[in-house]
Image (spheres, grey):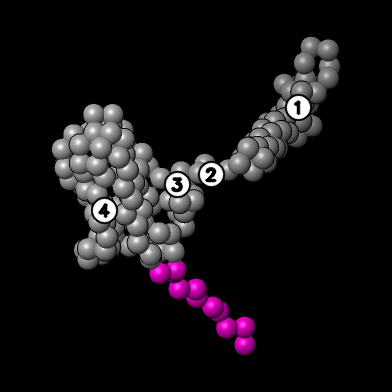
């Protein structure tokens, strides 16, 4: 078989019955690779548009805190509201708490730790106490129906770090 005959046979194998040449395997792989690259780019764009990492995946900002212990003693039931770790300084409220009650939390520096108690309608007597870093700071007593008491303290503001611009 001559080189011309081999070339004719090969060409005949790659033609469809209508006589047109079919695309070769190399052309198909280029299409597949191009489609994969396009899909990857589209995925990255969607990832960026839809927000990327969720809030739970982002690193938490470190806020300096101090250990604060809130304690309520007495008899009966009270509503207790206290400041815990929250940059916004929002209080946590626990209702219908049976005494005695005690909780140690982290409070951001610069936010005043505070505990408020309110007796229920049956009255009674309850005492709140506040300790910062294990040291007693303040106490107060509530008595009677819906009696109230508040204990608070001051925490120093966090030290600001300055970077030299030299």
Q: Report helix, strand or loop for mark 3.
A: loop
Q: N-terminal of the two: label 2 or label 4? A: 2
Q: Report helix, strand or loop for mark 4.
A: strand
Query: Residue at the spot x=24%, y=49% of the render?
Result: 141
Stretch in magenta: 156-166
- Magenta span contains residue 96: no
- In the image, which disc is placed on residue 90? 3
Number of the front mark, 2 or 4: 4
Magenta: main secondary structure equals: loop
Q: In the image, residue 67 lies at what x, y percent?
A: 29, 60
- Could you tell me if the residues under marks 3 and 2 are in contact, i.e. CB atoms within 8 Å? no
Number of the front mark, 3 or 2: 3
Quarter assignment of residue 139: bottom left
Quarter assignment of residue 107: bottom left
Q: Report, in whole angstroms, how far the alpha carbon at label 4 lies from the one at label 3.
A: 22 Å
Q: Nearer the viewer, residue 103 or 57?
A: 103
Q: N-terminal of the two: label 3 or label 2? A: 2
The residue indicated by pointer 2 is 53
- In the image, which disc is placed on residue 23? 1
Query: Residue at the spot x=31%, y=54% of the render?
Result: 151
Query: Residue at the spot x=80%, y=23% of the render?
Result: 21
Q: Report helix, strand or loop for mark 1.
A: loop
Q: In the image, residue 145 lies at what x, y percent?
A: 28, 33
Disc 3 crowd, CA 10 A, few/some/many (<14, 14-19, 20+): few
The residue indicated by pointer 4 is 140
Disc 2 crowd, CA 10 A, few/some/many (<14, 14-19, 20+): few
Above or below, comparing residue 93 to residue 138 in the picture: above
């Amino acid at each position: 078989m001559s080189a011309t005959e081999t070339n004719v046979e090969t060409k005949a194998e790659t033609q469809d019955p209508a006589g047109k040449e079919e695309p070769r395997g190399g052309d198909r792989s280029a299409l597949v690779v191009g489609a994969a690259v396009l899909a990857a780019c589209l995925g990255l764009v969607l990832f960026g548009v839809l927000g990327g990492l969720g809030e739970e995946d982002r690193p938490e900002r470190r806020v300096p805190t101090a250990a604060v212990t809130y304690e309520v003693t007495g008899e009966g039931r009270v509503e207790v509201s206290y400041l815990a770790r929250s940059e916004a300084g929002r209080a946590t409220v626990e209702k219908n708490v049976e005494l005695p009650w005690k909780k140690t939390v982290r409070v951001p520096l610069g936010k005043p730790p505070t505990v408020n108690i309110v007796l229920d309608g049956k009255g009674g007597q309850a005492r709140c106490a506040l300790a910062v870093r294990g040291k007693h700071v303040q106490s107060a007593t509530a008595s009677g129906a819906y009696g109230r008491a508040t204990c608070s303290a001051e925490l120093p503001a966090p030290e600001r770090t300055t970077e030299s611009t030299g």
